[in-house]
Amino acid sequence: MNHTEAFAADARTEPVIRPLEARDEAHWRRLWTGYLDYYQTTVPDEVYATTFARLLSGAENEFRGLVAERDGVPVGLTHYLFHRHCWKIENVCYLQDLYTDPVVRGQGVARALIEAVYCAADAEGCPSVWWLTQEFNYRGRMLYDQVATKTPFIRYNRLG
């Protein structure tokens, strides 16, 4: 049985959600590359290395990472950040990246990762967790509509 068949057979098992660790680098790189591929973008190796180091740093106001495991193998990831907000005293939480291996999609892995970020935000006293997604991310949006409220905001980026 290959890993794809094993994960498909293990669909009823709840994923183990835990903080990203140094030993996860190869799996994290595979998963984050899948995420970047989905959004049709690439980043240089220096960005991979810097991002992974930041995720492991534990520094205040730095991104944090979680992985979802099945049978000891990371099959999903999320990156999130606590930051200031001018309309609140407390920090808020930005969930920047969320990705699951295609072989485990629809098995509750992404939901478990979102819920783990919600728990982390609650533990930090953050009243709000927010994220962005592409309009074409229909499958993800079906889940997001169940676990969050869509807002009317439109994002703009600087020209150039």
Image (cartoon, rainbow, N blue to C red):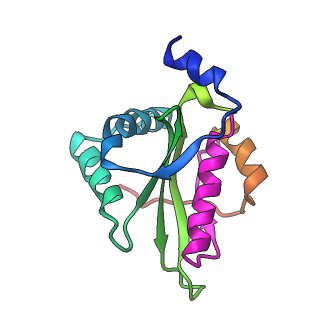
Q: Let me know if residue 130 appears in the view.
A: no
For the point 21% across and 46% down, which residue is it? 46
Going by the picture, which residue comes out furthest to the left? 46
Q: Is residue 106 depicted above or below 143 in this figure?
A: above
- Residue stretch in magenta: 107-135
Q: Who is closer to the viewer here, 141 or 29?
A: 29
Residue 119 visible in the picture:
yes
**Farthest residue, direction bottom:** 89
Asked if residue 46 lies left or right of residue 73, the reply is: left
Q: Is residue 106 magenta?
A: no
Could you tell me which residue is drawn at 32 percent across and 57 percent down? 56
Report x, y in % for residue 63: 40, 62
Closest to the observer, 156 or 121: 121
Point out residue 112 in the picture as x, y percentages from the top left corner. Answer: 64, 48
In this rendering, position of residue 55 left or right of residue 149: left
Rendered location of residue 84, percent (x, y):
48, 79
Task: Locate residue 23: give its quadrant.
Answer: top left
Residue 116: which quarter of the image?
bottom right
Which quadrant of the rendered structure holds the C terminus?
bottom left
Q: Residue at x 42, y 60 (%)?
A: 64
Residue in the image at 24% along x and 47% along y: 49
